[in-house]
Image (spheres, helix red, strand yellow):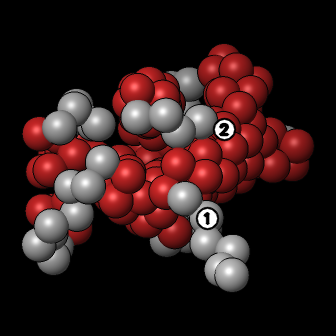
Amino acid sequence: MTNRQSPHDIVSRTLSVCDRHAMRLRWVMTETESLFPLTGVQFDNLAPEVVAFLDQFSTRFGKLQDAMGAKLFPQLLELVKEQGSLNTFIDKLNRLEKIGVIESAEQWLMLRELRNAFAHDYPEDSEVNAATLNRAMPLAEQLLETYEGVKVFALKYGAY
């Protein structure tokens, strides 16, 4: 007897992980919203606890974006039997857009680009760091909105 989980269970488990990242991202966005827009000079003079909040922001953004792109999206394609011959990530994104999981493949690529920007640390360039964070706040809102739409889609297919 095998103990194989159904696609519904797999998607539900990934959604639970994403829920945790989304909840913490929303919280830290509320805690830091008064900082924005942030300048390089302000970035250089942040208190250590504020830096910790901004680290939490970039970490949760990256974790949510990564969990969705690397795990949840392929799982949803499997759930709705849309996997087919989708060899490249952009093929998968285009299919997700076509079936209504995400609003825009192009928008998702921007979110992924920002996640990658967070992965590169430029401790000597406060202007770059401030600019990345300034760009991130509205994109984090888009990420959360995209996630909410994905949850609605998953619910229609009995996951979650």
Which of the 4 image quarters holds residue 103? Answer: top left
Question: Crowding at label 1, few (<14), some or many (≥20) Cα neighbours within 10 Å?
Answer: few
Labels 1, 2: front one: 1
The type of residue carrying mark 1 is Gln
Q: Residue furthest right?
A: 49
- Pick whichever, 38 or 88, lies toward us: 88
Which residue is disc 1 drawn over? 5
Q: Does residue 152 sit above or below 8 in this rendering? A: above
Residue drawn at x 49%, y 57% is: 7
- Pick whichever, 13 or 34, lies toward us: 13
Residue 18 screen position, x and y as percent: 62, 45
Q: Which mark is residue 19?
A: 2
Q: Does the rendering let one see residue 19?
A: yes
Residue drawn at x 65%, y 80% is: 2
Sequence order check, earlier mark of 1 and 2: 1
Q: Is residue 102 left or right of residue 85?
A: right
Which of the 4 image quarters holds residue 57? Answer: top right
Question: Crowding at label 2, few (<14), some or many (≥20) Cα neighbours within 10 Å?
Answer: some
- Pick whichever, 70 or 160, lies toward us: 160
Residue 68 screen position, x and y as percent: 46, 52
The type of residue carrying mark 2 is Asp
Residue drawn at x 34%, y 59% is: 78
Residue drawn at x 41%, y 34% is: 157
State how many labels appear.
2
Check the picture and name the quadrant holding the N terminus: bottom right
Q: Is residue 143 left or right of residue 48?
A: left
Q: Does residue 111 sit above or below 74 in this rendering? A: above
Q: Secondary structure at mark 1?
A: loop
